[in-house]
Amino acid sequence: MTTLPPEGQNPQVPGGQPSNDPVAPPAPQAPVPPQQPQAQAPQAPPVPPQQPQYQQAPQYQQPAGGQVPPGGGYQQPYAQQPVTDPVSNITLNYWLSVFFSWLPALIFFLIEKDKGNRQAYEFHRDNLNFSLLRVIVGFVAIIPYIGWAIAVLGGIVLFVFHIIAAAKAAEAYRTGQKPPFIFNVPLIR
């Protein structure tokens, strides 16, 4: 019995020629691996990190004619100073004066008097006046017999009034009112 190759296939001989021999066994064929698609998206090259950009300092330029302008010729660019809110200084002044008497009031008064803000000046001046009034009431204690009672009672009352004024000072400044002391003696004008 002879076996025939399946239809449509011709057995090949080792020389690469098809065999007409119906009895020759078919030559084994090597399996062909499936091809994978070769079209991959090209990868972008890695981007190096950017270096920070620095502004170059202005260079000195000699003015025309060889003359140096007043101030040495080099103009340094200055940033505008932020405007400070006087409310924070007033609040700090009042609360420090409540507990440390006239010394913080005097320091703030001397620092703030030449800054040009009339309303802030009035607040610092009145705080100094009230603090000096508290000191004067404390000196009443040297009067024999009744002086210590006046100094203690007056000191407590003025201490409470100073606390009330310190609590109301910021709001009074913002609304444009006068300093919030219940009463005051104008020792410094």
Image: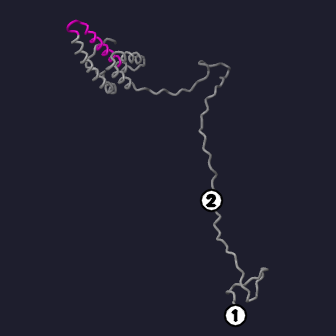
- In the figure, is residue 25 to the left or right of 105? right
- Where does residue 115 sit, x and y in percent of width and height? 42, 19
- In the figure, is residue 113 to the left or right of 129? right
Q: Seen from this angle, which residue lies furthest front?
A: 1
Q: Main secondary structure of the magenta part?
A: helix
Report which residue position mark 2 lands on.
Answer: 41
Foreground pick, 13 / 184 = 13
Foreground pick, 5 / 23 = 23
Position of residue 3 relative to residue 55, above or below, is below
Q: Which residues are magenta?
A: 123-147
Report which residue position mark 1 lands on.
Answer: 1
Q: Is residue 184 on the magenta stretch?
A: no
**Cα separation between marks 2 and 1:** 58 Å
- In the figure, is residue 79 to the left or right of 173? right
Q: Which image quarter is the C terminus in?
A: top left
Residue at x 27%, y 19% (from the top left corner)? 159
Report the disc number at residue 27.
Answer: none
Q: Give the secondary structure at mark 2.
A: loop
Residue 112, quarter of the rendered image: top left
Position of residue 15 relative to residue 173, above or below, is below
Q: Which image quarter is the N terminus in?
A: bottom right
Circle 1: residue type = Met
- Of marks 2 and 1, which one's residue comes earlier in the chain? 1
Q: Seen from this angle, which residue lies furthest top?
A: 144
Residue at x 25%, y 20% (from the top left corner)? 182
- Where does residue 188 sit, x and y in percent of width and height? 34, 12
Foreground pick, 146 / 39 = 146
- Where does residue 9 sit, x and y in percent of width and height? 70, 84
- Where does residue 126 sit, x and y in percent of width and height? 32, 17
Residue at x 64%, y 51% (from the top left corner)? 45
Q: How many marks?
A: 2
Q: Is residue 124 on the magenta stretch?
A: yes
